[in-house]
Structure formats: C-alpha cells, structure tokens
Amino acid sequence: MPPPKKSAPVITLGETPATVAAKAAPSTIEASADDSDDVQEEEITKKIETIELKDVQEKEDKGEEAHEDSQQEASHVKEADFVEEEDIGDEDPREHLNVVLIGHVDAGKSTLSGNILYLMGMVDKRTIERYEKEAKARSRESWFLSFIMDTGEEEREKGKTIEVGRAHFETENRRYTILDAPGHKTYVPNMIQGASQADIGILVISARKGEFETGFERGGQTREHALLAKTLGINKLVVVINKMDEAEWAQERFDECVTKLRPFLRSCGFAVKRDLSFIPLSGLLGHNVKIRVEKEMAPWYEGDSLIAHLDTMHIIGRDALAPLRVPILDRYQERGTVAMGKVESGILKSGHKILLMPTHTTVVVNQVYINDQPIRTAKPGENVTLRLSCGLDDIHKGFVLCDHDTKEEGPKAIVSFVAQVALVDTLEHRPLLTAGYKCVLHIHTITQECCVVKLLRPIDPKTGKPCKKSVPFIRQGQSVICRIEVEQSICIETYERMPQLGRLTLRDEGKTIAIGKVLTLGEKKP
C-alpha cells in the first residue's frame, strides 16, 4: 500500500498541458471552423438566454497532490492490497469542510495554519520544541510554526511556501482539511489548484504597517487571490486581519484594513453581509484563533474566535443525487494505482465500476480511503484516496471519474467549448484579447495550453446581455463570448449544469488575464 505521504504538499503544478488521451462523446454544439457562424450563433443564443450573464462570479449559492514530494502525505493506506471487511468503516457523519488560506506573501498563512493544528491538538509539544530549535538554528525564530506546514527544505530555508500544504483537524461538530496556499506570484498556479478544492476561503491580511498596503496595491497578491477565490467557486470568505499583536490590537488599524477591503471584495462578487466576515487575530501568538481574544486585549471586538466562527458557517450546493464527478488531483504507483481527488458530486463507492474520462475507460474502485481509513462510500466534499484497477499510465491529473451507468446525459470528452470570459488584466505587450490568442487554461484540476480561436459576441456592460454584432478584440474590463480550443481532450461541464467543473481561468506569462464560465461544450477530437 502507499507509504505515508508528507503532511504538507498537495499539488505540484506546472504550466504545461496534461497528458490526456483522446476519445470523445457526441458534442452538444458543433464548434468547428467549417460550421456556419449564423447557425452557431443562433444555437448559442438559445443556450445562453436562460443563463444570467451579468457577472461571471454570480450563481454560486447552488451550491487535493504533488508528485514525488507529495507522496508522503495523502493517505497512510494500510500495508495490504486487501482490506478485511471488518476494517472497513462507515463515513464519519460529521460534515467535512475544505478551508484554504490565501493572501499575499508573508501575510502569515503558514504560521496561522501551523498554530491552528497545534491548538487543535494535531501537533504535540515535543514536535513544536523541535521546530523551535530548527528555526533558531536557521536564524528564523518566529517561523517555527510555519514548519508544520512548510516541510520542504527550500520552503524552510527561504520562509516561502511553494506547494499547497494540507493537513486535517477536527472539532466536535465538523472535520476540516486545511489547505495552505503559497502567496508568492510565482506560485499562483499552485494556489489555483489549492483553492479549487476549497469550500471556504480564509484571506489572510497583515495588520503590520506597510505589509497590508504592499499586498493590496497593484502587483500584490491580495487582489489576485481574492478574485481567483471567487472565480474558483469559493462563496464564503473569512478575512482575518493577522499580526494584530504588532498593531497593539488597535481598532483603528483593523477598521482601516476592513474599510479598504470591502469595496474591492464587493467588486469581486462577494456580498458584504452574506459572504464576508472579518476577524482580528494573531496567528503567531494564537490570540482569537481557538479561544476568543480577551476583553482586556481587544474590548472593541465582539465576534467569535476563528475556529468558533468556522463551525457556524453554512455550506450549500453539495448534491449527492447528482452524477458522480471526481476530478483527479494526483496519482502514483504503490502496489497498484493510487489516485487522489475530491468528490464534487454524487456518491463514490468501494467495489463499484466507474468511467474514467476523457478516455472512456472502465475501471473498478477497489477501495476508497478518507484520512487513511478505508470506507465504503464517500459523499460530496470529501477528499479521497482511491485504489483503482487501471494502470498508472491510464490516469492523469485532470481526468475525471464518472458514473459508469447513468440515465442522465453522460460526460463528454471535448477539445473545444464556448465560454463567457471577462478580461481582468492584460500584459503590456498584449493589451488586447483577439482571435488566435494563446494562453494557459485552468479548469477544475486541468492545466492545459489553449487558444481563443474566435470571438463570437461581446457582452453589453449595461445589460449584461450578448450584443448582436461580433468584435475583432476586447480590452481590459470587457467581456466576450468566445470559442476556446485545447490540443488534448478534456472532460468538463457547462457552468449551468455543474459549476464545479465549469469555471475557468486564463493565465499568460504568470498573470491571470481572464476569468469565465463554460456555456456550451463543443467538438470531440477528430
């Protein structure tokens, strides 16, 4: 069985296309270049008339990972290929939440993550003392808590998270997976993969003078992370104003950060009263993390501690009755093929046959594991490790596990689709989005090079509806319905049918340039 995996990294993500085999199902809308544009636009219009196009972040209420290095965390699956029936348990009835920590580099995400695990009893005192000695030896005394999540040598030496760290903790009411995303702009693709797994986002802001401003101004990662979080389907955002001990718990500093953040987060699509909450804390000292901050320290704060607040948050949109969809995050070889993923919809059962897309391969789920334990079934929202009957080369990151037999419309393998995208940023030397624009597509766990082959209709900024006339290009701040092609077959869904597999991000030269949603699925690979 797989060896114990390292407790931090989840994903190593490159900017190269996934190796995806091509075999396709019939298309919903044929989008080949030979099609009549008039016929196609009429079909597209019919398809999108019932879809609200006002904003790409709306309609969210309907609602893990590296390769070699990550193979030391994901599942301490038992040392046998066969699991005795009496060892297989039922799923824990407590709700499971995936929480991702995002924000600018040096905001304190890894330190906060580490202290959460320590305060929740997941790390013992002896381990903490060992990390304190190691941090002191590196002349990084205040970094010791971050070593809980940052396990790589380079991460500890530079004090910079590179991969997404993952760990687990529990409360009386819930089970949590905590995802510590890198804050440096170089590792935004890793952040995207971490955030795509999350139900709730924690945006970590530094209250230290100058650090908040650096992260929030143009070029800082606070803005990009918040926008990506909403685009990736995170509807609830907890904004923690960290390092309040360095601001002497001044209400004025807290209010200043909140006042500047609210309008921007609203522009990202978060409803201030419904979707946002603001919590002051000290991740290093643990104040207001598990236990509410003392009145003597912050008499002006009347809210809950971070953990108490998380326990009260309501998550909607998980559908156990919907078709099974499990995007693959990673796979490796250990006495057979082992894969990791998150159940986005439907029910996953040990012993059942499933369909592996986009190759239309039938495989058997020999065993499902959650947090190292073999279980019979897994419902939506669960992070699972699977022992599969296929070979290692038969499955790759970005593949999707689906129902084998279903009365519903089956999954499709396509190389083109129509999407509505909003151009949120541009490169200095590429200020326009035109037909032929090549960039990198991120959609669920897929990372693949793509090409915007045609701009179909711009979106009227006043009405949010598609205009009748096409345009040759759009500028930053504008939106358009366009056709996108990829080289290798992928399995995705329309946003209307399954938002988790229908949200997309386009990036170019390390910068997020567009966000969007899939409207229709196009052609299969010839």
Image (spheres, helix red, strand yellow):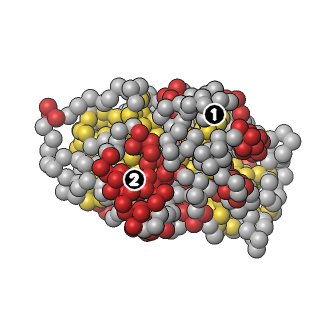
Front-lying residue, 259 or 483: 259
The percent coordinates of residue 225 (x first, y second) are 62, 52
Residue 509, quarter of the rendered image:
bottom right
What residue sits right under mark 1 in the picture?
298
Neighbourhood count class around disc 1 (C-alpha, 10 Å): few under 14, some 14–19, many 20 upward: some
The three-letter code of the residue at mark 1 reads Ala
As drawn, is 493 to the left or to the right of 301? Answer: left
- Residue with the most extreme front position: 296
What residue sits right under mark 2 in the picture?
148
The percent coordinates of residue 349 (x first, y second) are 30, 35
Front-lying residue, 188 or 508: 188
The residue shown at (57%, 66%) is 186
The three-letter code of the residue at mark 2 reads Ile
The residue shown at (35%, 38%) is 121
Task: Please state which of the two labelled residues, at mark 1 or mark 2, is closer to the viewer.
Answer: 1
Is residue 16 visible to us here?
yes
- Residue with the most extreme bottom position: 429
The residue shown at (73%, 68%) is 427
Is residue 24 visible to us here?
no
The percent coordinates of residue 243 (x first, y second) are 60, 48
In three-dimensional space, the C-alpha distance between marks 1 and 2, rounded to whole angstroms, equals: 28 Å
